[in-house]
Image (cartoon, rainbow, N blue to C red):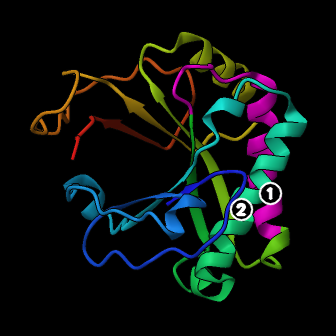
Amino acid sequence: MISRRTSSGKFQSCGDDILPARVPEARRNIATFERNQPLRNRGIRVMPIARQTKHVSRDDTFGADDAKDNVEDVISTFGANYLEAQGGKFLMFLDVEGDPSLSEAYYRGWANTVVSHSSAFSNGAVTIVPGVYATQGDDPTWHALAAAAANGVPCEGVWIARWRIRGCGAPLDFDVHATCASECPASMRYFALAICR
């Protein structure tokens, strides 16, 4: 599920496939991805991705405003009661594509608001925790994220695009031995590869 600042619409069930959810476009543009065994093995069927990539170099106020929209979209789409019944705690990735790179201020505003607003908006039923999706070589983003984390800003996961091939092609086998140069202390790291349809 993918969320942009100007969201509208509802998410759809994805059956057994992993579904990228771009909050808000997802409500009308849901497309299933290739099945992804590492995620499926952990029971992950939907991955919330906050996609306002052109905003990520801005200030903390802009980040907080985007986070409120992202959180409200996810909770309104699935319902606080349903999300609470599924465990009540969920990871949402901020999509950073490197043009522009992430600023520490934007991430601070976005990450802190994702956590606080999800709890407030759901009356304590749901907590959404922040993570970042970015390419391995985007040093300014990783430095901004490390600086934010050093100042107490939460980062619960990083999803690192580590391109081993460029362009469209058959997916490569999952590399369980891939290393991560990220300075962000994260409970989950996941490496990604593009698959074109």
Q: Would you say residue 5 sits in the magenta stretch?
A: no
Residue 184, position in %: x, y? 57, 27
Residue 167, position in %: x, y? 22, 26
Which residue in the protein does label 2 denote? 71
Q: Would you say residue 116 sits in the magenta stretch?
A: yes
Residue at 38%, 23% in the rendered image = 180
Residue at 79%, 34% in the rendered image = 108
Q: Which residues are magenta?
A: 96-119
Classify mark 2: residues with Cα within 10 Å, few (<14), some (14-19) or many (20+).
many
Residue at 60%, 61% in the rendered image = 24
Residue 103 falls in which quadrant of the image?
top right
Check contact, mark 1 vs mark 2: CB within 8 A. yes
Q: Relative to 168, is 56 on the left or the right?
A: right
| Cα gap from disc 1 to disc 2, whole angstroms | 5 Å
Type of amino acid at the residue the image marks with label 2 = Val
Marking on residue 68: 1
In this rendered view, identify the residue nearer to me: 145 or 165: 165
Classify mark 1: residues with Cα within 10 Å, few (<14), some (14-19) or many (20+).
some
